[in-house]
């Protein structure tokens, strides 16, 4: 005599589905965050490379930049050096003449002069006089997701600068105390020194652990 086949009860099926949903709710946010961070790192590294390639290809004397700082129209003149080598979707213009559809800025700009452009993927670049580093002539702010949140430096906003020696465009924060200049300033939206960490260490682990350093741990898993 054959034994009868047993079937799952409705309660057992519901419990199984409930466990699966709980596991998904726990794992999916972490997966999405890791994916977003990897995409952000790739974008920041790419824009750093692109800007430096353009800057280093100038045939003109870079020392001329030194005389542009804080002069009328300096941001536009600075931007014009890059214009032909950037695939711009929307030219938003200057602080004085703000134009273009979907033009906005997601952070407070204190500079007297700035020039903003949007890319097809929704990211934007802002070229401006230096406001946060006395040794820099100009700053470039890159927003990886445009008007998308959180609009915070070190999370989706990243800053680069051209120093007085005019050699390269540098990501902010190289060699600086990561905890003091990046991690502890994230909540106050002053984490622009996180940019160098993203470029050189290729991660955003400073969002998850606070014991990273330039001469120590470079990843939370180290």
Image (cartoon, helix red, strand yellow):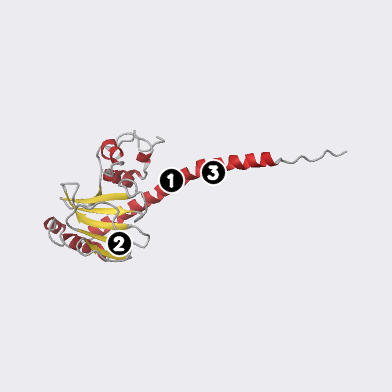
Q: Give the percent coordinates (x, y) of residue 29.
A: 47, 44
Number of other residues with Cα within 10 Å of mark 3, as a class: few under 14, some 14 to 19, many 20 or more = few
The residue singled out by tag 2 in the image is: 103
Give the CA distance from mark 1 to mark 2.
27 Å
Q: Secondary structure at mark 3?
A: helix
* Circle 3 or circle 2, nearest the eye: 2
Q: Nearer the viewer, residue 116 or 104?
A: 104
Q: Residue at x 88, y 38 (%)?
A: 1
Q: Secondary structure at mark 1?
A: helix
The residue singled out by tag 3 in the image is: 24
Q: Residue at x 27, y 46 (%)?
A: 192
Q: Give the percent coordinates (x, y) of residue 58.
A: 21, 61
Q: Give the percent coordinates (x, y) of residue 198.
A: 33, 45
Give the CA distance from mark 3 to mark 1.
14 Å
Q: Label 1 near label 3: C-beta < 8 Å?
A: no
Considering every residue shown, the one lying at the far front of the view is: 11
* Circle 1 or circle 2, nearest the eye: 2
Which quadrant of the figure contains the C terminus? Answer: top left
Q: Label 2 near label 3: C-beta < 8 Å?
A: no
First in sequence: mark 1 vs mark 2: 1
């Amino acid at each position: 005599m054959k034994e009868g086949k047993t079937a799952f009860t409705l309660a057992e099926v519901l419990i199984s589905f409930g466990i699966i949903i709980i596991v998904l709710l726990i794992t999916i946010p972490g997966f999405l965050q890791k994916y977003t961070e990897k995409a952000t790192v790739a974008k920041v590294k790419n824009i750093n490379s692109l800007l430096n390639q353009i800057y280093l290809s100038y045939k003109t004397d870079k020392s001329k930049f030194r005389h542009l700082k804080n002069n009328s129209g300096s941001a536009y003149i600075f931007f014009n050096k890059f214009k032909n080598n950037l695939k711009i979707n929307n030219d938003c213009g200057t602080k004085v003449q703000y134009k273009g559809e979907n033009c906005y800025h997601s952070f407070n700009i204190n500079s007297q002069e700035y020039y903003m452009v949007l890319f097809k993927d929704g990211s934007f670049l802002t070229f401006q006089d230096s406001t946060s580093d006395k040794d820099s002539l100009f700053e470039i702010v890159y927003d990886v997701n445009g008007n998308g949140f959180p609009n915070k430096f070190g999370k989706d906003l990243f800053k680069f600068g051209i120093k007085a020696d005019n050699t390269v465009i540098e990501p902010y924060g190289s060699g600086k105390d990561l905890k003091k200049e990046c991690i502890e300033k994230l909540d106050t939206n002053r984490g622009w020194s996180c940019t160098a960490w993203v470029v050189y260490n290729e991660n955003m682990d400073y969002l998850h652990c606070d014991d990273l350093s330039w001469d120590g741990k470079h990843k939370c898993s180290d």
